[in-house]
Amino acid sequence: MTRKYFGTDGVRGKVGSFPITPDFAMKLGWAAGKVLASSGTKEVLIGKDTRSSGYMLESAIEAGLSAAGINVALIGPMPTPAVAYLASTFRADAGVVISASHNPFYDNGIKFFSNSGTKLNDEQELQIEALLDQALNHNAMECVSSELLGKVRRINDAAGRYVEFCKGTFPKHLSLAGLKIVVDSANGAAYQVAPSVYRELGAEVISINDTPNGVNINDHCGATHLDSLQTAVMVHEADLGIALDGDADRVMFVDHNGHIVDGDEILFILAQAAHVKGEMQGGVVGTLMANLGLELALKKMDIPFIRAKVGDRYVVEQLKETGWTLGGEGSGHILDMNHATTGDGIVASLQVLKAVIESGQTLAEVKSGMTKLPQVLLNIRLTANNADEIIVSDAVKQAVIEAETVLGDNGRVLLRKSGTEPLIRVMVESIDPNMSQAQAEHIANAVKNFN
């Protein structure tokens, strides 16, 4: 069955427009509460990022869960991976994150985690959607009796516990002393915890974009807008820069030269470090969007590489299926199953810093074993919810065939709809950057003409 409301990363959209409305959030909380209660859930942990709309949605979800008889624990602004971890630490049965990750402030989203820190499976999401439809279309939301209503509590020491968890993933015999690091928290959920982690491990930290006001999250900062980090690294003559996104589940780096180190290169660095120490566990899971340069670099080390569908949930599925531990996306979602069950930007960054320190090299040097092929990614925003129709249209399919014919064996094309935004993404990769750009624009024009 096709999911109706849940995308690749929960439910997401523009605040005030369906489905990101108070009414929907309350009924979603109720439906999720009913499904989770059927499997023994008694308490759900709720965290959020720094969007002003988080307060509204938090109250609505809290009301829905309480109406279903589920207790609620509130932890306030906290990274998505922290909620996944803390749900288990505080013995909650599940976790909810209110965040639209890297999207602008006027978007928001709701996603759920199991008590093991993993996202809910498709079967659970379909069960939630079935109940949600009843509540939305038939006013079938039933409230438990007063004595069974869920109770709500606020947890005040969540941040400190998460900081200690992050530090615990870094070897005790190593230190960040001597490193000058610029940290860009995207005015998001990690604005307090991220600088603390690196400082407490010994680094000199210059913290930027750490003053959230409810509307400046991801605003030309963080993992999706690296200009300010690149500038700060150069101005402060830092050893490197670390950028998180609004909910800190992804991370990007900038080396001391001001050059970007993306998720594909991070995967290479981590795999190379494990390979050198004889600790590589199986292979690496990337996505359909992963740069061909990563695959070729891993092949030189005889490290297997497979591609999952785009979305960290699908990377996790492949990791579980293969028994491997390392995977991720070029956008900076990095999964190291030895340390976390979901993408965690801070934890992933610490593993990169570990590799840098143990190698005795700079970040620029440890990534030099991988050469990225020129890759062009164009995002075409849609005016209607017709991505599937566009992708299978004759004109667009013909444009893809023509581009693949031109590229031959020296490149590849990927056309897909976004799972979180009304976009169609066109990716073209080849050894010739001009050819990549030309063919990407050729396909994008076909999409725009249809749209």
Image (tube, helix red, strand yellow):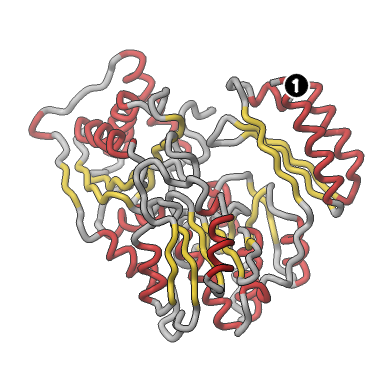
| Quadrant in which the C terminus is drawn | top right
The answer to whether residue 116 shows anywhere in this view is no
The residue closer to the viewer here, 196 or 71, is 196
Q: Position of residue 190 (x, y in %)?
A: 39, 57
Q: Is residue 359 above or below residue 23?
A: below
On screen, residue 133 above or below 285: above
Q: Residue furthest left?
A: 147
Q: Residue furthest front?
A: 235
- Picture residue at 77% right of the left edge, 28% below the top: 445
Q: Residues within 10 Å of mark 1 (few under 14, many from 20)?
A: few
Q: Is residue 301 left or right of residue 213?
A: right
Residue 331 visible to the viewer: yes
- Examine the image and state in which quarter residue 11 appears: top left
Q: Is residue 376 left or right of residue 58?
A: right
Q: Which residue bears the numbered disc 1? A: 449
Give whichever of 2, 112 is nearer the camera: 112
Residue 239, by quadrant, is bottom right
Q: SS at mark 1?
A: helix
Q: How many marks?
A: 1
Question: What residue is at 47 percent from the left and 64 percent from the top?
Answer: 183
Camera-nearest residue between 285 and 372: 372
Q: Residue furthest top?
A: 138
Q: Position of residue 385 (x, y in %)?
A: 58, 22
**Could you say where residue 54 lies in the image, as x and y percent from the top left?**
32, 39
Which residue appears at 68% of the width and 76% of the height?
A: 365
Pick whichever, 181 or 446, lies toward us. 181
Identified at 41% across, 36% down, the residue is: 108
How far across and down, in percent of the image, does residue 309 sit?
Answer: 63, 44
Q: Amino acid at mark 1?
A: Asn
Report the side of 449 relative to 27 (left or right): right
* Residue 170, picture quadrant: bottom left
